[in-house]
Image (spheres, grey):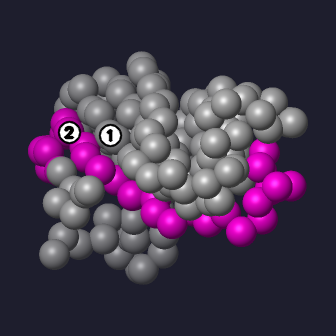
Amino acid sequence: MAEFTHFDQHGRAHMVDVSHKEVTTRVARARAELTMNPETLRQIRQGGIKKGDVLAVAQVAAVMAVKKTSDLIPMCHPLPVTSVSVDFDYPAENRLQLEVVVQTDAKTGVEMEALTGASVGALTVYDMCKAIDRGMTVNFIGLMEKSGGKSGTYVRKDTE
């Protein structure tokens, strides 16, 4: 197992020094999945939620969260994000998936940005729909794949 890099020689948290790393293109894809009543998902897909277009708002929230990740996660480096995409899928009548893909040309990766975007996008769906379905759950948030940098490519093996 790799050693933890966010602790100094005294065991205190610190931001990792990436000044010696090469700038490379780095991409990360993260997923969040919500489970809800089938009727809730039907209303989301048909634009029937009274607060507005849930998917459009969740998309904007995810992009905003990606751009603010270093303000939220203490040891994350601020990065020049070059691309963010947010996609939605419906793997079952009661499940909504959000996938966020983030790209940068930088000295460190964008896994946290993708995960933060997926998380905030999912929470935005919950916020917009909680009046009709308080039992919604965010069942999964995870890194699906990443590429770039010294550690190379990672692809999650337990994907559906």
Q: Amino acid at mark 2?
A: Ser
x and y percentages locating residue 83 in the rendered image? 42, 21
Name which quarter of the figure residue 7 lies in. Answer: bottom left
Horizontally, is 113 left or right of 72 in the view?
Answer: left
Q: Residue at x 46, y 59 (%)?
A: 141
Horizontally, is 60 left or right of 159 in the view?
Answer: right
Label at residue 28: 1
Using the numbered discs, state the Cα–Cα distance from disc 1 to disc 2 in whole angstroms: 7 Å
Sequence-wise, the earlier of marks 1 and 2 is: 1
Magenta stretch? Answer: 127-154
Number of numbered discs on residues: 2
Q: Residue at x 67, y 30 (%)?
A: 46
Asked whether 123 or 106 is in front, the reply is 123
Horizontally, is 104 left or right of 132 in the view?
Answer: left
x and y percentages locating residue 14 in the rendered image? 47, 62
Asked whether 17 or 83 is in front, the reply is 83
Q: Residues within 10 Å of mark 1 (few under 14, many from 20)?
A: many
- Above-or-below relation of 143 to 29: below
- Above-or-below relation of 71 to 156: above
Asked whether 88 or 7 is in front, the reply is 88
Q: Secondary structure at mark 2?
A: strand
- Residue 73 in sight: no
Q: Which quarter of the figure is the C terminus placed in?
A: bottom left
- The residue labelled by disc 2 is 147
Horizontally, is 127 left or right of 6 in the view?
Answer: right
Q: Is residue 89 magenta?
A: no
| Circles 1 and 2: CB atoms closer than 8 Å | yes
Q: Secondary structure at mark 1?
A: strand
